[in-house]
Amino acid sequence: MEDTKIRSELARLMTYDYSQLSYRNVSTPYRQDVRQIIPDSIQQSIRAGCGDIQTKDFSLMLPPTCSIDLPPDEVRRTAADLRAHPELVRELDFHLAQVSTFLGNLSRFETGLREVAERIDRLAS
């Protein structure tokens, strides 16, 4: 490959530490603990009404807004159960930090990938 810039960018992408983009990085104790507390019926309603949407490029995104109808008594009980675990606040802080790091890594990777693709497209034209 004659273009040293593309060669360098491709080498960087090919040697990228893809473990930084692993689901394990955002599968934190908070996710597990909250899901053990929130009843399955509420979790199913959340997934059905507010779950991931697959886009044309097969990525996933959350809907811009969503609403679900939940039984008020079940919501009150669940909220009380969640409040009974004050450690969730610290776990949520850690979870948000992990998600932020994950999204930053993903954004940098996507930017590099897009730049290489654009450079290749320009060379091919």
Image: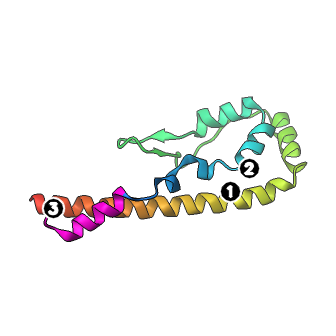
**Which residue, given by chain and number where applicable, does mark 1 sit on?**
95
Q: Position of residue 80 (x, y in %)?
A: 88, 45
Q: Which of marks 2 and 3 is nearer the N terminus?
A: 3
Q: How is the image coloured?
A: rainbow
Residue 98 sits in which quadrant?
bottom right
Residue at screen point 20% across, 64% down: 119
Mark in front: 2 vs 3: 3
Q: Which of marks 1 and 3 is nearer the N terminus?
A: 3
Vertical position of residue 7 compared to residue 66: above or below: below
Please, what secondary structure does the residue beneath circle 1 have?
A: helix
- Against 80, is 41 above or below? above
Name the N-terminal-most of marks 2 and 1.
Answer: 2
Foreground residue among 41 and 120: 120
Residue situated in front as seen by the camera: 109 or 100: 109
The Cα atoms of the two marked residues, 2 and 3, are separated by 47 Å
Reading the image, the residue beneath label 3 is: 1
Whole-percent x and y of residue 58?
Answer: 39, 41
Q: Residue 30, which numbered label?
A: 2
Whether residue 69 can be seen here? no
Main SS, magenta region, reads helix
Res 46 label: none
Circles 2, 3 touching at the beta carbon (< 8 Å)? no
Magenta-highlighted residues: 1-14
Residue at position x 35%, y 63% from top? 12
Callout 1 environment at 10 Å: few (<14), some (14 to 19), or many (20+)? many
Disc 1 to disc 3, C-alpha distance: 42 Å
Give the side of residue 118 with respect to residue 52, left or right: left
| Local secondary structure at mark 2 | helix
Query: In the rendered structure, which amino acid carries the disc numbered 1?
Result: His
Q: Is residue 42 magenta?
A: no
